[in-house]
Image: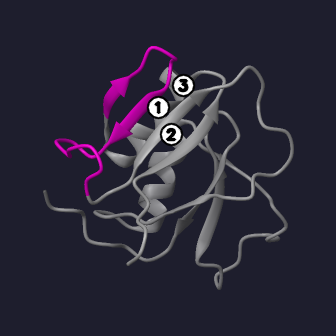
Amino acid sequence: MAARITAVAVDSTDPAALAQWWADVLGYEVQDTDDDGVVTIGPPGQESKGPQPVLDFVPVPDPTPGKLRLHLDLNATDRSQAEELDRLLALGATPVDVGQGPLTDEMTWHVLADPEGNEFCLLASTVAPLRG
């Protein structure tokens, strides 16, 4: 037997706004907002604990100090890495230097941050979109 990731929790000072931002990035939809202010997003039409993990945005009073020890890696599904990078930057992602040095032709990823500073990478290869 093995375990499976069903949700990734993300601390947020504005869960509704950050959840919507990530929903726009991933093509997800808001699935739930609970009484404690936790906002859950996931693939459209997916039932709870489906094949794709959901993201839970949990309200916290202050941003997490220091570098996060976990980040998401994203791959474009229907466009090139350059086109996806342009889309993410237009949505409000910002480039981040975590010691990777200047961008070179050999680099296959871009390090970015969401509007609350959570780092993630955009990888060069494309992947097939999920089919419901």
Residue flagged by tag 1: what amino acid is it?
Answer: Ala
Q: Nearer the viewer, residue 75 or 55?
A: 55
In magenta, the rendered stretch is 30-50
Asked whether the residues under the numbered discs 2 and 3 touch, taking CB atoms below 8 Å apart as contact, a structural biologist would say no
**Mark 2 lies on residue:** 90
Q: Residues within 10 Å of mark 1 (few under 14, many from 20)?
A: many
Identify the element where label 2 is drawn: helix
Which numbered tag is attached to residue 19? 1
Q: Nearer the viewer, residue 79 or 51?
A: 51
At which x and y percent is residue 48? 26, 43
Asked whether the residues under the numbered discs 3 and 1 touch, taking CB atoms below 8 Å apart as contact, a structural biologist would say yes
At which x and y percent is residue 51? 27, 60
Q: Quadrant of residue 114?
A: top right
Tell me which numbered mark, 2 or 3, is placed earlier along the sequence: 3
Tell me: residue 108, above or below residue 68: below
Q: Is residue 74 left or right of residue 42?
A: right
